[in-house]
Amino acid sequence: MPEGGIITIETRKTYSPKGDDGQEYVSLCVTDSGCGITSDVLEKVFEPFFTTKPQGVGTGLGLPMIRHFVDQARGHIEVHSMPQQGTCIKLYLPTAAES
Ligand SMILES: Nc1ncnc2c1ncn2[C@@H]1O[C@H](COP(=O)(O)OP(=O)(O)OP(=O)(O)O)[C@@H](O)[C@H]1O
Ligand SMILES: [Mg+2]
């Protein structure tokens, strides 16, 4: 958010966004009121080293690392965004039984 804004972090117990698979999930939703993501950029945000930041500023590894972590946890990730309005990145992580 180069011009400032609001970030909201929400967590909740929920079910799979892909349809109920009998598994309980925790969702972690990070919403910002920043510049948003255009559709051409949106399709590349998980490509390793893809960045729209100036050289030497962004690695382009933020979202690929998050996606890898979510995949390893057998979770799901969604990106919802509107240019000029903001972005919501939502992680779904399966809960584990306490041992
Ligand atoms: N919350 C967001 N709002 C707007 N654009 C975003 C957002 N998150 C990611 N993007 C877009 O996706 C691109 C890739 O994001 P990613 O986190 O993988 O790398 P980065 O942010 O460019 O670099 P780094 O994570 O190292 O700072 C960003 O360069 C930006 O264009
Ligand atoms: Mg990043």
Image: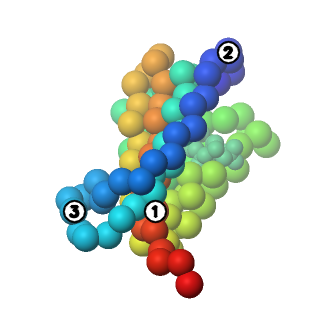
Q: Identify the element where label 3 is drawn.
A: loop
Percent across and percent down for residue 11 are: 51, 46
Identify the residue shown where x is 48% and y is 75%.
Answer: 96
Q: Which numbered dot is residue 93?
A: 1
- Dot 2 corresponds to which residue? 3
Alpha carbon separation for disc pair 2 and 1: 31 Å
Q: Residue furthest bottom?
A: 99
Depth check: 44 or 55 in front? 44
Circle 1 crowding by C-alpha within 10 Å: few under 14, some 14–19, many from 20: many
- Circles 3 and 2 in contact, beta carbons < 8 Å: no
Q: If you read the primary sequence from the N terminus, does the residue marked by circle 3 or circle 2 appear first?
A: 2
The number of discs equals 3
Whether the residues at callouts 1 and 3 have beta carbons within 8 Å, the answer is no
Q: Secondary structure at mark 1?
A: strand
**Label 3 neighbour load within 10 Å: few <14, some 14-19, many 20+:** few
**Left or right for 62, reference 98:** right
Screen quadrant of the C terminus:
bottom right
Sequence-earlier tag: 2 or 1 = 2
The kind of residue tagged 2 is Glu
Q: CA distance from mark 1 to mark 3?
A: 14 Å
Disc 3/disc 2 C-alpha distance (Å): 40 Å
Dot in front, 2 or 1? 1
**Residue marked by disc 3:** 20
